[in-house]
Image: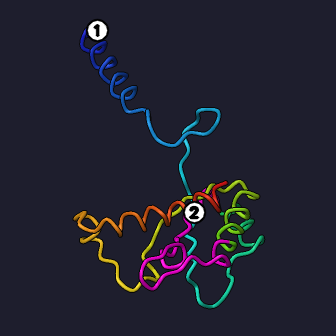
């Protein structure tokens, strides 16, 4: 009986120790971070929709991350697109608002604002121009926003 109890106890401890999170996002102290936040859509045609009070409210609701959707048509030279300095300033201000409220920023590139972009053609790797232009769009973000 004692041997069975010992084996069951050992099995339970081995299962719980192997189920601990060993990967994922970590803070400076090594603690696991669960990203909670909001998606910031930058192509709202009704004008500026986020301000300092909005970010303070997000933090009160438990936000620690924001996902900013980037418009490919405003950060690249794809057909129909053009790098828009005013748009880059808007992105910079959204990142700064997040940083001022201890909210980390994640960028997601969307294909808004380009005349024609077909993901299937992009992944088929047949058009070198598309790859270079897409990479250059990320360079624009890296060089202007992420400094």
Looking at the picture, how far across and down is residue 24, in whole percent? 47, 41
Residue 72: within the magenta? yes
Residue 113: within the magenta? no
The answer to which quarter of the image holds residue 119 is: bottom left
Q: Nearer the viewer, residue 2 or 59?
A: 59
Question: Which quarter of the image is occupied by the N terminus?
Answer: top left
Looking at the picture, how far across and down is residue 124, in whole percent? 22, 65
Work out whether mark 1 precedes mark 2 in sequence or the reverse, and give the earlier one. 1
The local secondary structure at tag 1 comes to helix
The local secondary structure at tag 2 comes to helix
Q: Nearer the viewer, residue 18 or 75?
A: 75
The residue carrying pointer 2 sits among few (fewer than 14), some (14 to 19) or many (20 or more) residues within 10 Å by Cα, namely: some
The residue carrying pointer 1 sits among few (fewer than 14), some (14 to 19) or many (20 or more) residues within 10 Å by Cα, namely: few
Looking at the picture, how far across and down is residue 97, in whole percent? 73, 64
Q: Which mark is residue 2?
A: 1
Q: Is residue 64 above or below residue 72?
A: above
Q: Residue at x 74, y 58 (%)?
A: 101
Q: Which residue is the extreme one toward the front?
A: 129
Looking at the picture, how far across and down is residue 12, in whole percent? 33, 25
Residue range in magenta is 62-88
Q: Residue at x 38, y 29 (%)?
A: 16
Q: Residue at x 25, y 63 (%)?
A: 125
Q: Is residue 122 left or right of residue 77?
A: left
Q: Which mark is residue 141?
A: 2
Q: Nearer the viewer, residue 54 or 116?
A: 116
């Amino acid at each position: 009986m004692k041997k069975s109890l010992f084996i069951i106890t050992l099995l339970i401890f081995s299962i719980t120790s192997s189920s601990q999170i060993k990967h994922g996002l970590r803070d400076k102290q090594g603690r696991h971070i669960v990203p909670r936040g909001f998606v910031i859509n930058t192509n709202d045609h009704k004008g500026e929709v986020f301000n300092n009070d909005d970010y303070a409210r997000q933090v009160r609701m438990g936000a620690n991350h924001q996902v900013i959707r980037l418009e490919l048509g405003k950060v690249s030279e794809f057909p129909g697109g053009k790098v828009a300095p005013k748009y880059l300033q808007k992105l910079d201000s959204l990142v700064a608002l997040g940083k001022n409220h201890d909210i980390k920023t994640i960028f997601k590139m969307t294909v808004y604002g380009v005349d024609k972009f077909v993901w299937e053609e992009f992944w088929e790797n047949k058009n070198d121009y598309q790859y270079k232009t897409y990479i250059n769009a990320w360079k624009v973000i890296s060089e202007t926003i992420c400094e």
